Image (cartoon, grey):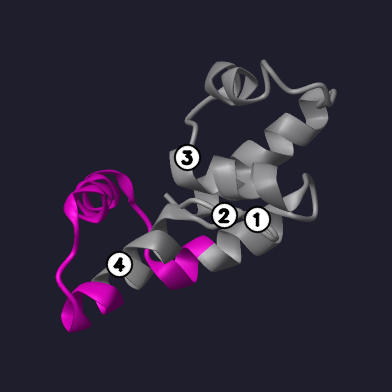
Amino acid sequence: MIGKKALETNPISMTKVKKILEDFSGKFELNYEQDLTLEHVNKFSELSLEDSEKLIDELENVVKRKYAIKIADILPEDLSDLRLLFAKERIPIKKENMEEILDILNKYR
């Protein structure tokens, strides 16, 4: 990695990572880190890629994309879990918005 730098970063969901790694593993052998990542996303991703993308699109109406992806990956079950996701963030989220997020999440469970 000497002399290389990231030009831009875009957050992606675990389901997208899963698809990318599965496609890559069909052509090449995964290294140790990639194999661990694939194992992790297989264990913890609960939604399909299509449902995940729809969920993220709906959540973007309430919060920014990076937060929508984080919420879609973790799928918090109640208000206290959702508050934990935003505990270190500097953006204030209203209780009404959090309840709206939970209503959107309940459609995809």
User: In terms of image quadrants, where is residue 54?
Assistant: bottom right
Residue nearest the observer in this picture, 34 or 38: 34
Residue 78 magenta: no
In depth, the one of 95 and 90 nearer the eye is 90
Position in image of residue 78 (x %, y %): 53, 25
- Badge 2 is on which residue? 3
Mark 1, other Cα within 10 Å: few <14 / some 14–19 / many ≥20: few
Which residue is at 59% across, 49% downward?
A: 69
Residue labelled with disc 1: 9
Q: Is residue 3 left or right of residue 68?
A: left
Counting residues from the start of the chain, the first of labels 2 and 3 encountered is 2
Q: Amino acid at mark 2?
A: Gly
Say above or below: 74 vs 33. Answer: above
Task: Identify the secondary structure beneath mark 1.
Answer: loop
Q: Position of residue 57 (x, y in %)?
A: 67, 63
User: Magenta stretch?
Assistant: 23-52
Q: Residue at x 47, y 66 (%)?
A: 51
> Which of the two discs, 2 and 4, labels the residue nearer the N terminus?
2
Q: Are marks 4 and 1 in contact (CB under 8 Å)?
A: no
The reply to whether discs 3 and 1 touch (Cβ–Cβ < 8 Å) is no
Which amino acid type corresponds to the residue marked 4 in the rendered image?
Leu
